[in-house]
């Protein structure tokens, strides 16, 4: 869950819990306050009712006391005992009473002191009513407990309640006046007892309602306790007229209870109002929390999101990412810090990239250098394990880098690294030997020069590495030999040319004279030796001629020579001459469209002749001589067949082959392994001289018992 | 074997010590209350001379009786009198002291002045005196005076009681109104103290004023008439205070008779059952409850402490006062404050 959602839920949860707790707390507080307020109000109302009710009694008491002590009344009653209903007496009473505490009075005179036995014949006859609307009931039973001090009682008759006061007043002589004061405790009276109009008052006599402030006398006595302990009050317990009432009931006299009822509506409404307001406030708080949450998210979580987004951007490599710094303080500081960090990272990254580029360039440069070095290099480390190898080596030995790195040196190059060289390699790595340079000839193949040198020690006490260079010096060796041969033949050629030139003239003279002598000699015995001399001289001339050909410098640049024709004609001539002696098969595979080459036709004929003669002489009785040709181009060491740069003529035979020890000397003049008289030992020297003259090359590959292959390469005319 | 026998010996010794220690503890301490005398002690003779025949003295006697039984004291009771005055009490005093020859006399003097001499005579004859409820003189026996011979006076703080009543009245009358006081005799310092206490209590409320003090001389009917007279004389009379049981009875009857229940606040002294009931019926508004049981109990206990244990006793032992009002009428603690209706 995201921070905002979590925070919002947390806020709402807190608000809900807080609202519930507040609800419970306020409910409790309101209930307590309501209880107290209701109790205070009830106490106040009940006290007011009590005071006013008893004030009514006090007023009646005081009224009766004033009557008792009034001289005017006494005199009037003494002088006008039968005029108690008169207006004058009424005026006197009003002056004396000056109160509304009595609704009506009854004055009754008795002559007999035993007043309790007096029968009341006409109730209303001696009643003075101060309020005409209040008429005593017809059969009202008066209190007959007369004393010389007022006596009050609350009485209920015919469903109505009254406050009745009695007083015995002495009259003239033995006459006494029994005075009754009556106040009707009707609903108006009870309403005057209350301070608040909504407050109700009820009067109970012996648990029976006898008066009420309301129009209809509703009784709650069934719900009330039996007035065991006045005063009592009861809150929130009673319902009357679908209202809840707080009730106080107080004994105002034995068996008489005054009940005060105060409606509880306002407290219930207050509680409902406060609680409903609380619910609204809580709801509003929740809404405000949501709004604040949104604002909060805008001001906090949004910046946080931006920071997260920026972090992701930075993670993906966009170090140019920056944050706005116009937010609230903390995020401004955070953004500044972030921006500073990304700037530093960017700088570092750029520097690092620069370094890496430099290192890469340097590495590539080094590798290029290493790869460009004409030698094949190996870096050999601990345990004589190859750590690196340059491309030249891999190309040279057709190896893959993966197969080389990590392999033992002698595993990769078993023919080169024998046990002796491995030992030297180990010693060099351990600093016991400075360097090694050896030449190794891989069997039947190239010549390698192996150089082993220690790599500069990078750390103290660490095992040294060694750099091994393996150079294929076959061509160099071959070239050296060729140069050597060329130089050697050149010296011989110069010597031979000098000798031949000096000997050619005397031989010519000898030959001419001998031929002359032969022609002149008639004696066979003389003639035969002369002929022998002539033959030998002729042979000497041929030898000298060959020597002169070997050393000849002039070139015959015939450009349109057809090799194939010359070779074929030469072969035909030779095959004809050897046909009877040996069974030799010839095959000529020369393309028709060979390009022109720099050589004269006679010289090409001479070369073909000499090589084929050698092949024929190398065969005992039979064999094969294959002559083929091809063109190619040498692209910086890479031979491309079909090119037009060189023409290669290959003379291959199945003769007895040339011993390896003789191979180096076959081009030397007069070197021959043949019997005397068969060869002069100058044929291959002539071939070499002719080909070399045209900047061509002659190479030989011969194996004893298998045959010999001569390869002649001549540049094309183009 | 040797080791086993040695261990058993140690265990036996330890058990013996524990049992012996326990036996010694119970022997020297005993299982009974340390306050009670052993039967071998000589019995104390105490004579209780009550005041009027009313529940206050029933309760005092009950307390004295229980304390005597706990201490194996022989408690004698002089007869109650309908008329509680100096003369009759002095006669009774002479008769019963001579008759019982008590070690200690517990008495509620009918007069704080007139009973000094006869009680001093008794004291000089060898009977120690303890006053309960009503004291001699000003009730201060710690100062040297002619009435300072009793061992102690045990009673409630009447001044404080009067002050408490006044304070409570100020609360239920909104601190205003005319008050009538009905009391018995001016020479009984206990009653006078209550009056003084009441005056002291209302002194802080200028709107409260005592309009009359009526002495009924322990005559209930006179108290009745005086109450009715006060009601007629003072039209706005807001309260009537009876400082003693007799006065309170008269007031209670007058209110009941006139039907003036609730018109004036009625303050009665003495937690008589009928007074307490008057609160329920609305006839009275407050009843002052002394603790007569404690008075009787503490009197006998003090006599025992002083005479038998030979230890000093405070010259004044104050028992508490509780106001019984409609608010606390049914508290369980209030029931203990109500006086006995009859002799135990």
Image: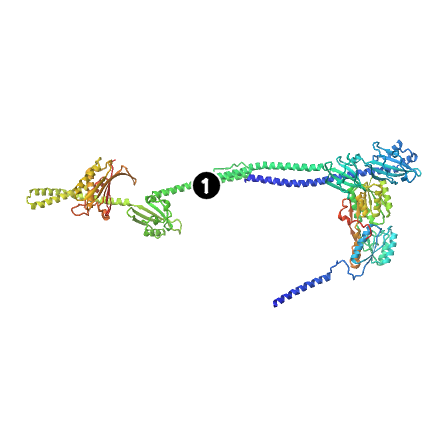
As drawn, the residue found furthest toward the right would be A173
Residue A151 image position (x, y, % from top left): 85, 40
- Label 1 is found on which chain of the structure? A
The count of marks equals 1
Q: Nearer the viewer, residue A687 or A584?
A: A584
Q: Nearer the viewer, residue B238 or B259?
A: B259
Q: How is the image coloured?
A: rainbow
Q: Is residue B203 visible?
A: no
As drawn, the residue found furthest toward the bottom would be B2
Locate residue B165: give its quadrant. Answer: top right
Q: Is residue B293 visible?
A: yes
Residue A556 image position (x, y, % from top left): 20, 37
A423 horizontally vs A115: left or right? left
Q: Residues within 10 Å of mark 1 (few under 14, many from 20)?
A: few
Name the residue carrying label 1: A348
Residue A468 image position (x, y, % from top left): 34, 48
Q: Nearer the viewer, residue A552 or A716?
A: A716
Q: Nearer the viewer, residue A451 or A713?
A: A713
Residue B21, placed above or below residue A74: below
Locate residue A639: give its quadrant. Answer: top left
Callout 1 secondary element: helix
């Amino acid at each position: 869950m995201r921070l905002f959602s979590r925070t919002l839920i947390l806020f709402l949860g807190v608000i809900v819990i807080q609202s519930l707790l507040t609800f419970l707390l306020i409910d409790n507080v309101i209930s307590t306050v309501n209880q107290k307020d209701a109790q205070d109000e009830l106490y106040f109302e009940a006290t007011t009712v009590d005071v006013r009710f008893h004030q009514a009694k006090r007023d009646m008491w005081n009224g009766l006391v004033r009557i008792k002590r009034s001289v005017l009344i006494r005199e009037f009653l003494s002088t006008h005992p039968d005029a108690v209903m008169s207006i004058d007496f009424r005026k006197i009473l009003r002056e004396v009473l000056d109160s509304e505490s009595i609704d009506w009075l009854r004055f009754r005179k008795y002559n007999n002191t035993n007043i309790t036995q007096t029968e009341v014949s006409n109730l209303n006859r001696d009643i003075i009513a101060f309020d005409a609307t209040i008429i005593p009931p017809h059969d009202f039973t008066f209190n007959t407990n007369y004393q010389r001090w007022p006596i009050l009682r609350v009485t209920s008759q015919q469903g109505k309640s009254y406050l009745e006061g009695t007083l015995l007043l002495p009259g003239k002589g033995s006459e006494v006046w029994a005075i009754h004061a009556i106040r009707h405790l009707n609903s108006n009276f009870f309403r005057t007892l209350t301070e608040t109009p909504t407050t109700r008052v009820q009067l109970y006599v012996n648990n029976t309602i006898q008066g009420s402030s309301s129009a209809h006398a509703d009784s709650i006595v069934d719900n009330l306790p039996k007035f065991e302990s006045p005063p009592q009050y009861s809150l929130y317990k009673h319902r009357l007229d679908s209202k809840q009432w707080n009730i106080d009931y107080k004994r105002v006299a034995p068996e008489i209870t005054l009940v005060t009822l105060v409606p509880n509506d306002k407290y219930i409404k207050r509680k409902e109002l406060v609680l409903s307001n609380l619910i609204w406030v809580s709801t509003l708080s929740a809404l405000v929390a949501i709004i604040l949450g949104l604002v909060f998210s805008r001001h906090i979580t949004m910046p946080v999101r931006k920071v997260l987004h920026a972090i992701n951007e930075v993670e993906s490599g966009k170090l140019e990412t920056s944050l706005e710094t116009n937010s609230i303080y903390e995020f401004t500081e955070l953004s500044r810090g972030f921006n500073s960090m990304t700037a530093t990272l960017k700088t570092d990254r750029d520097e690092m990239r620069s370094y890496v580029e430099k290192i890469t360039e340097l590495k590539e440069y080094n590798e290029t250098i290493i790869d460009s070095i004409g030698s094949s290099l190996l870096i050999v480390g601990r345990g004589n394990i190859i750590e690196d190898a340059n491309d030249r080596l891999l190309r040279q030995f057709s190896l893959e880098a993966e197969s080389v790195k990590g392999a033992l040196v002698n595993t990769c190059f078993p023919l080169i690294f024998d046990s002796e060289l491995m030992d030297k390699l180990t010693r060099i790595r351990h600093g016991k030997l400075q360097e090694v340079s050896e030449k190794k000839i891989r069997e039947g193949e190239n010549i390698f020069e192996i150089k082993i040198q220690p790599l500069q020690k990078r750390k103290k006490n660490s095992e040294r590495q060694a750099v091994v260079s393996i150079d294929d010096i076959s061509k160099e060796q071959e070239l050296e030999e060729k140069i050597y041969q060329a130089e050697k033949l050149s010296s011989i050629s110069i010597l031979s040319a000098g000798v031949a030139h000096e000997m050619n003239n005397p031989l010519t003279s000898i030959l001419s004279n001998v031929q002359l002598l032969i022609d002149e000699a008639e004696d066979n015995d003389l003639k035969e030796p002369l002929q022998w001399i002539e033959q030998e001289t002729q042979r000497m001339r041929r030898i000298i001629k060959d020597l002169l050909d070997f050393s000849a410098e002039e070139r015959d640049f015939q450009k349109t020579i057809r090799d194939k024709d010359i070779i074929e004609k030469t072969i035909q001539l030779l095959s004809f001459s050897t046909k009877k002696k040996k069974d030799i098969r010839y095959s000529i595979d020369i393309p028709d469209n060979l390009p022109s080459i720099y050589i004269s036709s006679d010289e090409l004929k001479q070369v073909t002749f000499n090589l084929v003669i050698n092949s024929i002489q190398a065969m005992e009785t039979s064999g094969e001589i294959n002559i083929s040709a091809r063109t190619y181009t040498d692209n910086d060491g890479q031979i491309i067949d079909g090119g037009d740069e060189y023409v290669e003529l290959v003379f291959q035979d199945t003769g007895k082959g040339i011993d390896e020890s003789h191979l180096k000397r076959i081009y030397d003049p007069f070197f021959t392994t043949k019997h005397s008289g068969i060869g002069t030992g100058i044929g291959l020297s002539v071939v070499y001289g002719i080909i070399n003259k045209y900047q061509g090359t002659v190479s030989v590959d011969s194996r004893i018992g298998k045959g010999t292959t001569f390869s002649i390469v001549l540049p094309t005319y183009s | 074997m040797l080791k086993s026998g040695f261990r058993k010996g140690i265990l036996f010794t330890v058990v013996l010590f524990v049992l012996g220690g326990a036996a010694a503890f119970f022997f020297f301490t005993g299982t009974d209350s340390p306050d009670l005398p052993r039967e071998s002690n000589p019995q104390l003779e105490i004579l209780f001379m009550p005041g009027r025949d009313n529940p206050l003295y029933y309760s005092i006697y009950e307390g004295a009786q229980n304390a005597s039984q706990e201490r194996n004291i022989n408690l004698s009771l002089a007869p109650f009198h309908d008329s509680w005055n100096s003369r009759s009490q002095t006669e009774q005093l002479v008769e019963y002291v001579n008759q019982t020859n008590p070690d200690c006399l517990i008495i509620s003097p009918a007069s704080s002045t007139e009973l000094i001499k006869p009680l001093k005579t008794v004291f000089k004859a060898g009977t120690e005196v303890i006053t309960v409820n009503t004291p001699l003189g000003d009730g201060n026996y710690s100062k040297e005076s002619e009435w300072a011979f009793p061992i102690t006076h045990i009673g409630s703080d009447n001044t404080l009681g009067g002050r408490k009543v006044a304070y409570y009245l100020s609360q239920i009358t909104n601190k205003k109104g005319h008050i009538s006081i009905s009391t018995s005799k001016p020479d009984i310092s206990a009653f006078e103290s209550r009056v003084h206490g009441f005056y002291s209590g209302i002194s802080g409320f200028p709107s409260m004023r005592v309009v009359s003090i009526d002495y009924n001389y322990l005559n209930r009917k006179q108290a009745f008439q005086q109450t009715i007279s006060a009601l007629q004389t003072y039209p706005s009379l807001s309260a009537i205070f009876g400082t003693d049981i007799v006065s309170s009875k008269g007031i209670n009857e007058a209110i009941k008779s006139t039907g003036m229940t609730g018109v004036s606040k009625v303050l009665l002294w003495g937690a008589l059952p009928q007074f307490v009931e008057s609160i329920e019926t609305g006839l009275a508004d407050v009843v002052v409850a002394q603790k007569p049981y404690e008075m009787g109990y503490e009197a006998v206990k003090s006599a025992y402490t002083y005479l038998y244990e030979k230890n000093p006793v405070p010259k004044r032992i104050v028992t508490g006062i509780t106001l019984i009002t409609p608010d606390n009428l049914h508290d369980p603690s209030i029931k203990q404050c109500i006086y006995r209706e009859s002799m135990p």
